[in-house]
Amino acid sequence: MSMSSEYRWETNVNMVLAGAAGQGIQTIEQGVTRLLKQAGFHVFATKEYMSRIRGGSNSTQIRIASHPIAAPLDRIDLFIPLDEAAFIRYSPRLTSASLVLGDRSRLPSHPGLVDMPLAALAEKAGDSRYANSVAIGAVMGLLGVCPNLMNDFLCQRYVDQPEKVIEGNQAAATAGYEAGRNLVENGRVQIALQSSPGVSNDLLLNGSEAVGLGALAGGCNFISSYPMSPATAVLTFLARQAADFGLVVDQAEDEIAAVNMALGAWFAGARGLVSTSGGGFDLMAEGLSLAGMIESPLVVHLAQRPGPATGLPTRTEQGDLLLALHSGHGEFPRLLLAPGGLQEAFALTRQAFHLADKYQVPVIILTDQFLVDSFGNIPDLDIIDLQVKHHFIKSEADYARYQVTASGISPRALPGYGEGMVCLDSDEHDESGHISEDLALRRTMTEKRLRKGGELLNDAIAPKLLGSSDYHTLVIGWGSTCHVLREALETLGEQPVAGLHFSQVYPLPPQSEQWLLRAEQLVVVECNATGQFADLLEQAAGCRIDHRILKYDGLPFTVEDLVARLRAALDLPDQTDQEGGI
Amino acid sequence: MPQDYELPDLDIAWCPGCGNFGILTLLKKALAELSIEPRQLVIASGIGQAAKTPHYLKSHVFNGLHGRALPAATAIKAGNPQLTVIAQGGDGDMYGEGGNHFLHAIRRNPDLTHLVHDNMVYGLTKGQASPTSQPGFVTPLQVDGVCQEPFNPLSVAIALNASFVARIYVGAVAHAVTVLKAALRHHGYALVDILQPCVSFNRLNTYEWFEEHCYFLEEGHDPEDRQAAFARACETERLPLGIFYRDSKRKTFEEHLAAYRHDSRPLYQRSPNTGRLHELINDKRLN
């Protein structure tokens, strides 16, 4: 065996820990991300799991780095399979540079396999089910994290378990720790990764929590939803906050009830949210149209997953953009926001409540499984001035809900607050809200409603330029592709190529035009099969998209994948050696 | 006074002789006798001729989608429990299109009154069968007559332990007002199935037919007796009127909500708990 290091990890380590559902992959993900963050490493984790409760294959991919990161990588530096199925599933991604820690007697042979009998070590510590703690220990040992942090984590994780479970898991983790430490001490693995002390004070959260916290900051006090992956975590997060935040939480009988309840809640003066995915959103279409007609604020969190129909329930896609744009019969304004990462998931969800209330339109927040399920550290959330500004009024006796105004926005009153009567109707209606078939009035009311769409542009969220403004090629992304796009462009390092990320996808922010017009070549990157945002840009901005880089296998873009596809699309020379480049 | 609910210059869309006129009168009378102020009253309705009722009396109105009045009404009450909330519509609206919401509203037990105009036919779409149409009823669509078992809202509601279940007939005015008042006063979900003729599209279930087929539950009927109530609700040859069933012990949906555990104010009067939000965010530092 060579004495020089076989594995040298520079600024990044990308690890995959995988096993069957029920083997504790989630605990590994929680433990490893939390402990490495506490130790000062930047972390980013994404999950992949199968749509079942036990068995199948689950994995967490955890990337750590000396600098902030928020995009997945393709290569695997460290792989810890908890069973053979996990090994087989990930073996196509292993290279000669991948270190595999696992039980040699149970896994197929691989040149990078270093024997670490997880189950046997766990059994020695008390129970073979502690194998996930061995895995946590091994990672901590490799990275030289203080073992006390690890023991504290296990103590908290199993706080409601008997003492011997805690001790057994700690012993299992210690065994893993020693095995990991040995690999460093005997020089097989060399780690140049730097930790930054400030990181330990960062927040560590996932996309669902960011959306949930954003909703609370936006004054959300009513959520009615029907469980559906990957949107359920927002509902459960908010359910836990019900008492502290005076939040009404209801698991509706179906999505039709959910959206109609949210509209009833806004009518009564609450701030209502529904969280759903494509299939559930389909059922809400009529409710969305009702929001348009009665000019009710509404906030919808649409966590996308691959369709059509049930599709791939636990995987990711950006396939519902045009659905969100066109859903609901008739013509009415709406706002579509698509956060690029955790900070925006918080900030835009919060903003969604403000804008829905201000303009009396439905606001749809488009996330996806990748975004809601990924974890990462961020220094803080934007929590300056948490006061919520309400836009409803106290009514006078002669109040008319649909008073025609120049902006199209009529003062919104609430039942029981003031002297006036508040009347909403899904039929075409007069200013007082009562049914009308006056066809001249129909024109007036249609125009009034549509004027709000123009007004919405006053608060448009401009797209963000990634890179230098001195570009000839602009690579456009929206929603959750923000960070992978940023990193791919940095890796590409081509000066005349810049990125433009949209977190408001409809109506197109007026600021987009100047950026789009300046480019000689436009590329759109999105996680769907047809290029829905590319279509929208061509239609709404009148530009021509030269290349569409699309992905629709249920997995998010990785940095390497996007770099390679950008090189191919832009006809740039292939860079064969990317080792250490990312 | 019933006049407190009058609206000026109404252009009412109902046919002359429609049972809805009678129901509107009954409702205004019951509301007036209970001194429920229009300012505190919200009526949520769906689509159909019955669902237009809230446009013809003074109240706040949420005239939403076909079949969806109950979810909206439930949320309105949950958002502001100080309001008196009624969900109103026809048999097609509430038992057909909105059937699932009917089942689950009963399970939640929101404190609202559910008024269903039951004329056993579709009016606004011109004469098709409704979920409560009688077997053999011939329509332009059911050309060989209705072959489905009629939906029995009362027995369904009692099976689900609805907290108040009643039936009235628009022609029995004094009785109907008494029952309506009891329903409005009831703390919890109260179903009132209101029998009415449709003079344009139902030539079978006419005023005369209802007069012949309806009778009042005798004074000895004990609404606390669920088995007896269920048996009475299953009668189909002749239709009993009155309060079939009542379970006043059930907690309401709003009483179960954490949001009102320590604070009775309607949600619109509240601000987010920013102190707790800061704590929640800082908890994510996990140190």
Image (cartoon, coloured by chain):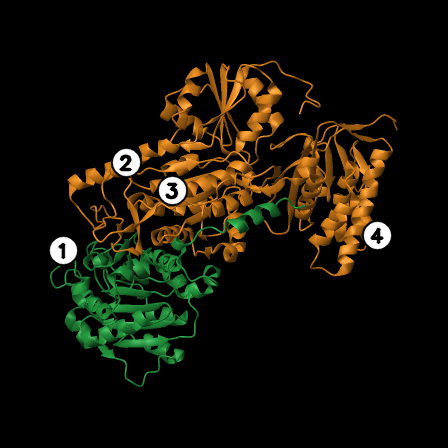
Query: Where is residue A6, by image quadrant?
Result: top right
Q: Quadrant of residue B126?
A: bottom left
Which residue was labeled with disc 1? Answer: B10
Q: Is residue B10 above or below residue B27?
A: above
Assign the C terminus of chain A to one quadrant of the image: top right
The chain that hosts pointer 2 is A
As drawn, the label of residue A356 is 3
Between residues B178 and B204, which one lies in front from this camera angle? Answer: B178
Seen from the viewer's position, the closer of residues B70 and B92 is B70
Residue located beneath label 2 in the image? A407
The image shows residue B142 at horizontal and vertical percentages of 24, 58
* Chain of the residue where label 3 is placed in the rendered structure: A
Q: Tag 1: residue type?
A: Leu
> Mark 4 or mark 3, which has the lower sequence index?
4
User: Would residue B138 be found to the left or right of residue A141 on screen?
Assistant: left
Which quadrant holds the N terminus of chain A? top right
